[in-house]
Image (tube, coloured by chain):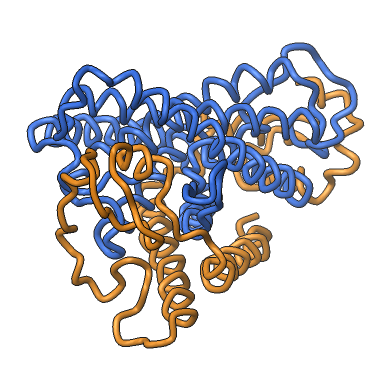
Chain colours: A orange, B blue
Amino acid sequence: MSRRSWPFLLGGLLVALVLAGVVSNYASSHPDGLDSSLLKGCTVNADDEITGGSCPAQQARDHELADSPLADYGVRGVGNDFLSTGLSGVLGVLLTFAVGGGLFWLARRRNPAGATSTGPGATASTGATASTGPTGVDEAGPARAATTGGTTASRPTGDR
Amino acid sequence: MHISNGIIDGPVAAIFAAFALAALAFCVLRGRADLDDRLAPMAGLVAAFIFAVQMLNFPIFTAGVSGHLLGGALAALLVGPWVGALCVAVVLVVQALVFGDGGVAMLGLNITNMAILGTAAAYLLIALLLRVLPRTPAGLAVTAFVSSLVSVVVASQGFVFQYWLGGTTDLGGNLGGLAGTMAFAHLLIGIGEGLITATTVVTVAKVRPDLVYALRALKPAAPVPAVPVAGGVR
């Protein structure tokens, strides 16, 4: 079943890479809802820099890691803005997938035989395997549901 | 909606760091029941996808203000509330430690607002709406849209609460003004988030309905004979 998930994972990752690597260059660079709320009372210029007045945003301090090579979604040393933003986005997506996926993989349940565990995944698989027999194999259920999705919809077990 | 350094004072930031840590530990404990060999890589993808979409600031009501997806509702729909909150937290940690987005000292505040509050509010609504609405693409889209919208506004008011506790500028009793400004801006951002979340989740439900946690975990209130969107997965 996890083998069948790979095309989806790769496809999803590709979409994320295109969004972060290309589309990100067309994002608005204006302050977001929170930052703009904190600018109330101040006047700003065309670059959204404070030019006068008094507002909460003036208390903002530099980021601890403002010197990070990827700070502010750019790659230090890359002169081309489009490339710099896109590259930082691609690196961010891959890093987030590696860190997140890695941590979740380490934290996952490792008792595939544990039929007593009551995750929603387990619930789903019992629903699918109920009609085919008490195999008790956690893996088979959702895969079967995926491959025979069209026919299982009309089964009476669909009401569970 | 990332808080920059200096906006909230140190003691309040520390309190929320402790709260966020405890809440995330609880999410790990509860989330492990959901985290199997299939959900773990999916959760990594959800985190990576949220990172990507958070880069896409879209303009809202005036030309000078933007907003971006927070991702709590999307994560809750796709991988459940516990793992979902952890997904958003992973994104926030990467952003703070690598991309200089959101102060490291403010991480607890940001995780509380976007990962904990946003995801919790979203999932409460998802659990309610998915049970009462028809199991159609439209029902799923409405669930995604409404839960996203509300979760963004709730997260924005989390910041207002934190500012009330430890804001570094004396608003002179005008906290209500900040609350109103934040709520209005994030109502509009929430519409954007709702559209993105609904589009994404309905697409995933069409391609791989078995990969949508909320469709697996939440049963309709009344038995529904035809299951067009679920495609056979309960």
Residue that appears at 30% across and 39% down: A38
A109 vs B37, left or right, is: left
B96 vs B128, left or right, is: left
Q: Is residue B20 above or below residue B209?
A: above
Residue that appears at 53% across and 47% down: B39
B163 vs B89, left or right, is: left
Q: Residue B114, percent across and down?
A: 39, 37
Residue B221 location, quadrant: top right
Total label count? Answer: 0
| Nearer the observer, B58 or B82 | B58
Q: Is residue A40 visible?
A: yes
Q: Residue B79, percent across and down?
A: 54, 41
| Nearer the observer, B203 or B217 | B203
Q: Quadrant of the C terminus of chain B?
A: top right
Q: Quadrant of the N terminus of chain B?
A: top left
Q: Residue B215, percent across and down?
A: 68, 32
Residue that appears at 28% across and 21% down: B175
Residue that appears at 8% across and 32% down: B11
| Nearer the observer, B116 or B103 | B103
Instruction: Name the residue furthest top.
Output: B222
Q: Is residue B40 visible?
A: no
Residue B110 location, quadrant: top left
Q: Is residue B72 above or below residue A96?
A: above
